[in-house]
Image (cartoon, rainbow, N blue to C red):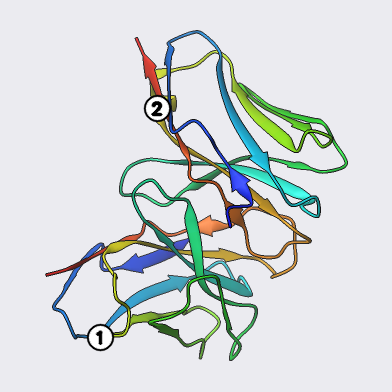
Amino acid sequence: DQQVKQNSPSLSVQEGRISILNCDYTNSMFDYFLWYKKYPAEGPTFLISISSIKDKNEDGRFTVFLNKSAKHLSLHIVPSQPGDSAVYFCAATVSGYALNFGKGTSLLVTP
Amino acid sequence: DGGITQSPKYLFRKEGQNVTLSCEQNLNHDAMYWYRQDPGQGLRLIYYSQIVNDFQKGDIAEGYSVSREKKESFPLTVTSAQKNPTAFYLCASTQFFQVNTEAFFGQGTRLTVV
């Protein structure tokens, strides 16, 4: 049973615009959320995270928003760049137990 | 430079054969993990190890085995009992098992059954 869901398999955005990637979860015990970026044939790399006690975390062009009541989080990339084209995985954990991943959203940033 | 090394990058296996995927880390991390990725799927946990000489089954452990004799090494064996082994395998580590921090991933091994 998928506890972390990314319902959009793909997203296409123009360079310079905002990319918004969404993630929903079902387990209310999740207390830490992470986003990973993955290029083809490579391992995922950590992008940004947020604790359940916060509702926003920002790092440069990347901002993650958490809405606990809706069990929803989103990753905003502003401005989007062609090098951001990759698959983005949302992940969640309960007290540091091994990560639960979503299926990923493939982002394509076009010039 | 610290990191996780997986080898080989590509691996071909004949039906009925066991194969072992290597995962080595020099990050001095206690916990290590094996994930499997299939097209259109998220990463699914196969096995994890919290500490040396300890390992636990993840969500899809059937047909796989692991060992953790050294802190640095967490090899995964795909046995002939695994009915659909063709996939992309990722090894990861975290400093400790129960810590809210990011996992570091290897570059992956693509296993194909021929």
Question: Looking at the picture, does residue A82 appear above or below residue A51?
Answer: above
Q: Amino acid at mark 1?
A: Asn
Mark 2 is surrounded, within 10 Å at the Cα level, by few (under 14), some (14 to 19) or many (20 or more) other residues, namely some
Q: Position of residue A52 (x, y in %)?
A: 82, 43
Q: Which image quadrant is residue B53 in?
A: bottom right
Q: Which of the numbered marks, if any, corresponds to residue A29?
A: none
The label nearer to you, 2 versus 1, is 1
Decide which of A4, A20 is in the foreground and name it: A4
Decide which of B18, B104 is in the foreground and name it: B18
How many badges with numbers are in the image?
2
Q: Amino acid at mark 2?
A: Ser
Whether residue B2 is visible, yes or no, is: no
Q: Which of the numbered marks, if any, corresponds to residue B18?
A: 1
Q: Which chain contains the residue that carries disc 2?
A: A
Could you tell me which quadrant the C terminus of chain B lies in? Answer: bottom left
At x 51% / y 8%, what residue is drawn?
A: A17
Q: Which image quadrant is residue B95 in?
A: bottom right
Decide which of A77, B69 is in the foreground and name it: A77
Q: Is residue A72 left or right of residue B69?
A: right
Q: In terms of secondary structure, where does tag 1 sit?
A: loop
Which residue sits furthest front? A1
Whether residue B98 is visible, yes or no, is: yes
Q: Which residue is mark 2?
A: A85
